[in-house]
Image (cartoon, rainbow, N blue to C red):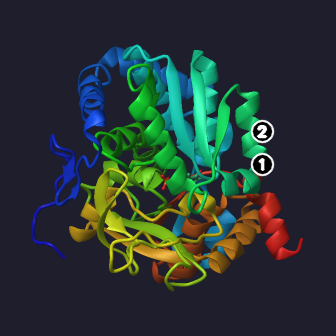
């Protein structure tokens, strides 16, 4: 553990979280990213912008989301009192809409007319297509051809919402390649287009902007747990793909040393090269798609194949702020395997009547496995980042239901 005090006012003006983050992009994007950062610092921090965003989050997206006492899950685990933060109840089914709404208001402020985004499982694509429809923007979503097949329902949703969905066939034909194509489009059309990046990843200022638009999760949780229990939780758990739902939940608690923060990565079929997406298990320092952070790469720095049963966690890099929090000893990171996540998916459905997204099921798997180590007087909050409708068909196939 580091002896340095933890800094809560990061990143610095260059986008650094300690040794992580930064701006590793082509020259042509540098000006636009700096413009975006400047616009964000001035416009987005005004009371008028924040009030408008809060109104859309309330009336369009459905905030605040409940902090729900999971009584039967608590009984089953026999440890801490477990609360679920219900991001699954938001419009479009996951926390992604928080960031998409914030960024489209920013795009409008900057006078942009067209929206570009990447998507893996399709949740960020759906959230982006939704806000583009709501605010009358043209919208192009890049998606790996393999993912388009796996997530046909979300492809249809995006098309009904008026977005153009462009298949990407390069490489593994999944998320990483979709981001490359979205970046290429943005380089060409940067004057008219805003790129809505979907996680706390990529070049500065995205990791900061996405965190700030997602911190509403942690801010609400803090007020809600204080109201219900009169004190802060002992442990907070969230799944970590790029890291946006986790950092949004963690950030308002970083200064509270008594609150343990646990991120859960995708352990896939186990920690074997190419079979998982747990960057802190067998990953290394590297640069991927604009940011310096922990990545899954081989000895030559080539990005390795990744695997997870949940498409939303299946990415080779983790958001740079998580790398910082881990070095500082402020957050810890564990993983759940596909099998553990699928078991958790079923257990939450059967004990609480809630079918979680397979991504969120990784966080549930952690509390099922480790929750018993906390005594019954303790309080745990698990971020339920999304609902499982999108995953039901896949899970049914695997489980033979
Ligand atoms: C996209 C997604 C994730 C993973 O993304 P983060 O940026 O790590 O939050 C997790 N849960 C759900 C439901 C998602 O749709």
**Label 2 C-beta lies within 8 Å of the nearest ligand 1 atom:** no
- Residue at point 78% right, 38% down? 156
Left or right side of 166 for 14: left
Image quarter where the N terminus lies is: bottom left
- Residue at point 44% right, 26% down? 189
- Residue at point 50% right, 71% down? 277
Q: Mark 1 points at which residue?
A: 152
Q: Are marks 1 and 2 in contact (CB under 8 Å)?
A: yes
Give the structural element (helix, strand or loop) at label 1. helix
Image quarter where the C terminus lies is: bottom right
Instruction: Indicate the quadrant where residue 343 lies.
Output: bottom right
Circle 1 packing at 10 Å, graded few (<14), some (14-19), many (20+), is: few
Measure the alpha-carbon separation of dots 1 and 2. 6 Å
Q: Name the residue under label 2.
A: 156
- Residue at point 48% right, 69% down? 264
Instruction: Indicate the quadrant where residue 188 lies.
Output: top left
Q: Where is residue 231 in the image (x, y as percent from the top left)?
A: 37, 55
Q: State whether residue 13 is above or below residue 67.
A: above
Q: Position of residue 304 (x, y in %)?
A: 46, 73
Q: State whether residue 94 is above or below residue 332.
A: above
Residue 371: mark: none
Give the structural element (helix, strand or loop) at label 2. helix
Q: Position of residue 167 (x, y in %)?
A: 66, 45
The residue lying toward the viewer, choosing from 118 and 346, is 118
The residue lying toward the viewer, choosing from 125 and 250, is 125
The residue lying toward the viewer, choosing from 58 and 342, is 342
């Amino acid at each position: 553990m580091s002896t340095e005090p933890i800094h809560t006012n990061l990143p610095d003006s260059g986008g650094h979280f300690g040794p992580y983050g930064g701006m590793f992009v082509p020259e042509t994007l540098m000006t636009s990213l700096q413009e975006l950062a400047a616009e964000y610092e001035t416009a987005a921090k005004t009371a008028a912008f924040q009030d408008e965003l809060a109104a859309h989050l309330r009336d369009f997206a459905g905030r605040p989301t409940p902090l729900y006492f999971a009584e039967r899950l608590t009984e089953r685990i026999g440890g801490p009192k477990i609360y679920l933060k219900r991001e699954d109840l938001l419009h479009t089914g996951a926390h992604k809409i928080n960031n998409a709404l914030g960024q489209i208001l920013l795009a409008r402020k900057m006078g942009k007319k067209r929206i570009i985004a990447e998507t893996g499982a399709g949740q960020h694509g759906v959230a982006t297509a939704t806000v583009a429809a709501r605010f009358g923007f043209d919208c192009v979503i890049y998606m790996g051809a393999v993912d388009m097949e796996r997530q046909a329902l979300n492809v249809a949703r995006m098309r009904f919402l008026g977005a153009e969905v462009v298949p990407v066939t390069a490489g593994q034909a999944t998320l990483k390649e979709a981001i490359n194509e979205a970046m290429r489009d943005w380089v060409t059309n940067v004057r008219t287009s805003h790129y809505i990046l979907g996680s706390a990843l990529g070049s500065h200022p995205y990791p900061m902007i996405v965190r700030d638009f997602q911190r509403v999760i942690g801010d609400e949780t803090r007020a809600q747990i204080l109201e219900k229990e009169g004190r802060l939780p002992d442990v907070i758990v969230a799944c970590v793909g790029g890291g946006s739902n986790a950092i949004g939940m963690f950030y308002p608690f970083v200064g509270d040393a008594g609150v343990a923060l646990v991120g859960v990565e995708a352990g896939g079929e186990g920690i074997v090269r190419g079979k998982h997406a747990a960057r802190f298990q067998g990953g290394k320092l590297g640069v991927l798609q604009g940011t310096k952070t922990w990545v899954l790469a081989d000895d030559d720095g080539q990005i390795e194949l990744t695997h997870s049963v949940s498409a939303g966690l299946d990415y080779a890099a983790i958001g740079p702020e998580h790398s910082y929090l881990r070095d500082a000893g402020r957050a810890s990171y564990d993983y759940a395997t596909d099998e553990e996540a699928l078991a958790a998916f079923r257990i939450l459905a059967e004990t609480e009547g809630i079918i979680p997204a397979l991504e969120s099921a990784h966080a549930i798997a952690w509390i099922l496995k480790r929750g018993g180590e906390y005594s019954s007087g303790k309080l745990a909050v698990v971020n339920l980042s999304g609902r499982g409708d999108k995953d039901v068909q896949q899970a049914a196939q695997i489980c033979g239901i």
